[in-house]
Amino acid sequence: MPSAISEPDLIPPDPAAVTQPAGSAALHVARAASVIALGNVTSRVLGLARETVKSHLFGATWRVDAFQVAAVVPTQLYELLIGGMISSALVPVFSEYTAPERRQELERLAGTLITLAAITLAALVLVSEGLAPLIAWLLGSGFDAQTLDLAAGLLRITLPSVVFLSLSGLLTGLLYALKRFTLPAFTSAVFNVSVVAAALLLGERLGVASMALGILAGGMVQIALQAPGLAGLRLRPALDFSHPALRRIARLYVPVAASLVISQAAIYVSYNLASHAGAGSLAWMNYATTLIQFPLGLVATAISVAILPTLSRQSQGDQPSASTSDLAIFYRPFLSTLAHGLKLVLILIIPATVGLFVLAHPIIALVFEHGAFTPEDTAATAQVLRFYLFGLAFAAIDQPLVFAFYARRDTLTPALVGLVCIGIYLGAALAPTLWHSRPLRVSDLALANSIQWISHALIMLWLLRRRLGGLGGYGVRALIVKAISAAAVMGAAAALIAWALAPAMSVGHTAGNLIVVGGAGLVAVLIYGVLMVVLKVQELDVVYQLVKSFVKRGADV
């Protein structure tokens, strides 16, 4: 994923005045969020298609476990080297050079970063190729020799994608700073298309290696997609080490990088632990994570990225130090934008969480239970998903909170909080095996993830309150109460409708699950929408406008 104090007269801010950022800022956030949301919807749908194809062709077998090892390494290297830099350093620093009179400085800076990344990453990939068997063992020491050999072979295919993914990430940060959101919003979509196409075309002949080739092709396609968005910029290879922005980017990113090193190590530990939890455990975790990432990407990531440039600009200037009331005045626009983003996240993520929890089994059966994916795999994945859902809302609000600290050029605080929460995760994951002397279960790891997300969001909220006065008086708490109340009624109705529609399973597996999920889901959406109108939730108007913009942009694409 507080309370604010006061103005000089100790009267809290008028909620009506601060529910949204003023005028054009609110409109910009909604429009930007709609573009990013459209890209995320496309990406998540294609991501589900990718996982459906994978589950149909390969199920939840040892081969999929091996593929997951090969798929996670380039992704995590990208996050460590470039992905974590986009929001924490690239967008805030690039944004300082977007004025027309500073465009040449921006071009020189971008050219230098691209050149450095290409040289450094190419060398890293060459070294990693030689270490592929060791990397596979570090992530899956619980696997047998056959699975480890396959993982190392697949890893040698996927590793070069780090270069292309990272260069694409640099272009994404540049385009976001220029407020050119459309093409970057679809990079994940074309990546998923590449993996799906490779699996469908080559799956029978190459097995899971086809998906590894799809990952490599996906990184290349991402760069090609974003190239037209660079119109008007003259990007050339450069090595301008004297550019002052390089030092600012390094200063902002070093704390994040330190945190990411530890977090990546924690992910590797998690994968290693899962390799000891039985065959198929990594696959079940991955399928459940795919469903979790759908609302996170559609809601939390889209809104967080949309508000980041606005937050970055609103945090600029000399911070007053005279009194708390001066801080409250200085940060009112900043906190207003943040509160607006959080409320948009909450109004959508809370019902999504309840709906996924209630309909977990039929949703997983509909999406994944085909071909090699068995009913036993559905039951195991549903259990893992429900444990993840305990922390989903906290993971969603944590994203805009972290971005708010990034906007203030404070990357150290989220990094330190992340380190603390990694310790919390490891303790929560291992506690059941230590206290009850039983083998590790994949559900232990999912629950530990939820505990980690909850802890991180709560600590970030506490720090926000300590430093900026918090979000009291901005209507966040009232919205949470209304959203939870409406979602509880919605969830009960969805469960009842799903039970009533259960006899539809007699018409067939796919059709029956589609009737159950579609019928219960439609009723749930209608009930939640009506209840939020009855409860007079003002943010519903913003969501309506965002959806209108989203639909319009979808029709234009």
Image: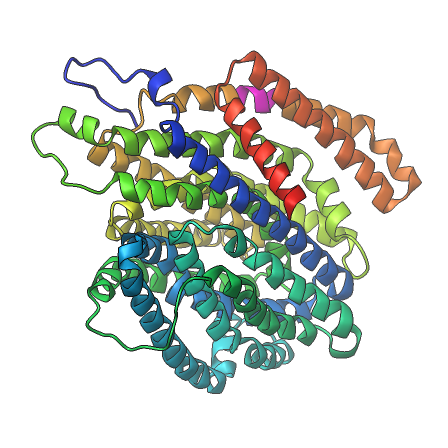
- Of 452 and 215, the residue lying toward us: 215
Q: At 54% from the left edge and 40% from the top edge, which residue is drawn? A: 34
- Relative image position of residue 549 (x, y in whole percent): 57, 35
Q: At 88% from the left edge and 32% from the top edge, which residue is drawn? A: 503
On-image quarter of the N terminus: top left
Q: Is residue 487 a member of the stretch shown in magenta?
A: yes
Position above or below: 221 against 554: below
**Quick check: 320 left or right of 186?**
left
**Quick check: 307 left or right of 201?**
left
- Relative image position of residue 468 (x, y in whole percent): 22, 33
The colour scheme of the drawn protein is rainbow
Q: At 19% from the left edge and 65% from the top edge, which residue is drawn? A: 244
Locate residue 516: give its quadrant.
top right
Count of labels shown? 0
Q: Is residue 486 a member of the stretch shown in magenta?
A: yes
Magenta stretch: dominant secondary structure: helix
Range shown magenta:
484-489
